[in-house]
Image (cartoon, rainbow, N blue to C red):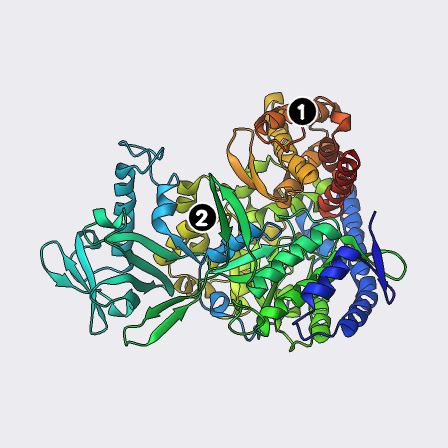
Amino acid sequence: MINYIKIGELQVASELFDFINSEAIPGSLVDQEQFWGGFQRIINDLTPRNKELLAKRDELQTKINTWHRENKEFKFDRYKAFLDEIGYLQPELEDFSITTEGADDEIALKAGPQLVVPVDNARYAINAANARWGSLYDALYGTDVISDEGGAKNQGGYNPVRGEKVIAFAREFLDQSVPLQDGSHKDALRYTIDQGSLVVKLRNGHKTRLQNEEKFTGYQGDSTQPSAVLLKNNDNYFEIQIDQSHPIGKTDAAGVKDILLESALTSIMDCEDSVAAVDAQDKVLVYRNWLGLNKGNLTATFTKGKKTLTRTLNPDRHYVSPNGSELTLPGRALMLVRNVGHLMSNNSILDGKGNEVQEGIIDAVVTSLCAKHSLIGNTSHKNSANGSIYIVKPKMHGPEEAAFANELFNRTEDLLELDRNTLKIGVMDEERRTSLNLKACIREVKDRIVFINTGFLDRTGDEMHTSMEAGAMIRKNEMKSTLWLQSYEKSNVNNGLSTGLQGRAQIGKGMWAMPDLMKGMLEQKIGHLLAGGNTAWVPSPTAATLHALHYHQVNVKEVQNNLIGNITDLRDDILQIPVAENTNWSQDEIQSELDNNAQGILGYVVRWVEQGIGCSKVPDINNIALMEDRATLRISSQHVANWLHHGICTKEQVIETMERMAKVVDEQNAGDPAYRPMAPEFDQSVAFQAACDLVFKGYDQPSGYTEPILHSRRLEAKAKHSVRS
């Protein structure tokens, strides 16, 4: 039972009311009475518009479904004309450039990894903020980037054979990024600083310098025996760390113990797809952690082995520059916060009519209030050097919804007495109507935009739901090679460059979802830079450090400069629907597809619904750990719903598959003492019922989203387990 406190017309859950009044408002220079009065006016004024936009989504979807049913013989020109007629496709725009001011260098000028993390987990959130710097030696030694061959297995204590492979890799990195005038870093005996220059003594007794001496930017310790040498390549920093007494350093001819890379330049603290926040209790946890990050006082205590450890935010890093002055670099990633989209409401606040308030409106106001503390200096660790607050806005459909977000941000700034465009927006390009009209979306937020990003999984889920009536979709793994997807990725970069994001904002690429397969990431994710992305998502601090290597290999500014002259309109290609040309799959192929989808759905949903875990490594059907969130769930559930709708499989077949795969998922989670098995009493498992709902009710879900079902079933599970306890 929720305890509400009435303030004005609003009813606010006591947990949220107390948090805002006792923790978020004090020190923010915001008057409590004015805050609640202004918050109520925002809710009253903007809720009707929010609901109109959601109704328009449904209206357009109904028209598209009807068109496909009435046009079984598909003609592309007629289809495109229809989309134009109903306003799904916006008219072409004249060229313009964004006018965003005040974006920090990590967003406007530098290129590097972006780490996304659920903010409801304090330990993960602190780790993400601290992932600005990462050990290259640790990232290599602990992952499959270094092979086990030749006696180099990673097991037990330190393996010197594996260690030598790590050191050889790191020295190769130094030779590529900061080459010497003569010789190799492999032959270095000593690093010293002489009259502002880095001098390297080699094994042959010869002393040499860097080919480009400007890449030496600072040091720590004594100039004759530095403990760290700071270098810079493609605007990204890294340190050669030196310690002759360190277990690794004492075995190294030059005393090098590690290479410390500037890794996650930015981090997204996520309130959306990677968290399971369904009520006031959950939302307060999200907001409290975000407030603690902005105040700089968030801590996380945990047990590792027999030790109790406490994580805090890292301090800035200090060096002596080549000219002898002090150089300070940020010790933490620049933080963005991802709010929820426009769809969901939340029972943490009820309006004057007793209706749940739209969660996106609540998020905008409360996360901005929390972030203001860092902005005005009420913090031990300031986030933005330039006085900006960064909010990523997901799952918007078209320019009208982007304009609504802009209005919401304007109203929030006025409420919190912030200068106009203090709140910067990141636009997730992950819905079909947005990617087709991305230029128009950017124009609606051109004074505050700092980020566009592609999201393959959500975008594919929306592709399938929008075109549900067009026919049976191709197999899920074939989506990555389709024309529409390749064109969508290119179009995102094209629109970003053509509207002037270069030098002002990020053009982002999506997530590497296999956190244990770092060798594959190192081989493949460089493609995101070569395609023009100046940031790309990674699932862990280790992945951020390894992905950072790509930004030393590729100068993204040069890539983007070459792309600017080759921008073309790709909307016709994006409109190609991934319907299977023929559906004569064998029964084994159909069953394999169902097994894979069902196992992924169940593996994620059971943790979401029963344990409130919004993002985790979930073993797939082949026991390969995948980083799963609601986006991966959306594509899997929509794919099965599509095949059901078009008779590729039967309801009985899907039920049998779900029950069989539930037993597999139960076995995969057998080692988790908090896990609640789904089998054999499937009708008693809230998680199993939720997974079935996502498939069997998938056709009717708004835009194919999973949130409505997940939220209702999570609330059911919480109530059920609360009664039992």
Question: Is 31 rendered above or below residue 150?
Answer: below
Q: Measuring 66% from the left and 63% from the top, which residue is drawn there? A: 367
Mark 1 — residue? 657
Amino acid under label 1?
A: Thr
Residue 337 seen anywhere in this rendered image of the structure: yes
Amino acid under label 2?
A: Ala
Q: Quadrant of residue 680?
A: top right
Q: Measuring 37% from the left and 51% from the top, which residue is drawn there? A: 135
Q: Measuring 62% from the left and 24% from the top, which residue is drawn there? A: 591
C-beta proximity under 8 Å, tags 2 and 1: no
Mark 2 — residue? 543
Question: Is 275 rendered above or below residue 295?
Answer: above
x, y percent for residue 509: 52, 54
Residue 584 seen anywhere in this rendered image of the structure: no
x, y percent for residue 170: 29, 50
Is 328 displayed left or right of 376 in the figure?
A: left
